[in-house]
Amino acid sequence: MNRGKRTGKGLTPYQGKGRCFGEYRCDDCHRTWMSGNSWADMGQECTNCRQNIYPHTQRPLNKPDGLDVSDENKPHPQHLCEKCKAMGRRCTESRRY
């Protein structure tokens, strides 16, 4: 259900402009992961089967339950991030013009 070459709006629960916390589950291999670098209508590749997976849950960063605080010291796997690939750079880098 959550894999494939889908594009467009409404692919993820969150539809805001900023980064959020996402929870992922691969339907093929059942691997689960969480990421503080989740974006609207963007997926992340499963490290096991390399399918692009869209998050099943997304919520704002720094929510009080503590699980969705992004660790800025943990390296972000750009090669697995659809947003990084689309931007051609690390998705967490802010650019001001």
Image (cartoon, helix red, strand yellow):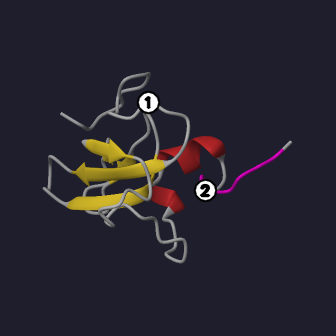
19 w.r.t. 35: above or below: above
> Disc 2 versus disc 1: distance between alpha carbons?
17 Å
Which residue is at 86% across, 42% downward? 97
Proximity of marks 2 and 1: CB atoms separated by less than 8 Å? no
Among the 4 quarters of the image, the one containing residue 57: top left
40 w.r.t. 85: above or below: above
Tag 2 residue: 92
Check residue 15 in the rendering and tell me which mark sits there, or answer none: 1
Which residue is at 39% across, 43% downward? 43
From the viewer's side, name the closer residue of 96 and 11: 96
Disc 1 is placed on an element classified as loop
Residue 41 shows in the view: yes
> Left or right: 79 with respect to 46?
right
Q: Residues within 10 Å of mark 1 (few under 14, many from 20)?
A: few
Span colored in magenta: 91-96
Disc 2 is placed on an element classified as loop
Residue 15 in the image, given as x and y percentages of width and height: 43, 30
Q: Kindly identify the amino acid type of the residue bearing the numbered disc 2.
A: Thr
Identity of the residue furthest to the top in this view: 9
Q: Main secondary structure of the magenta part?
A: loop
Identity of the residue furthest to the front in this view: 64
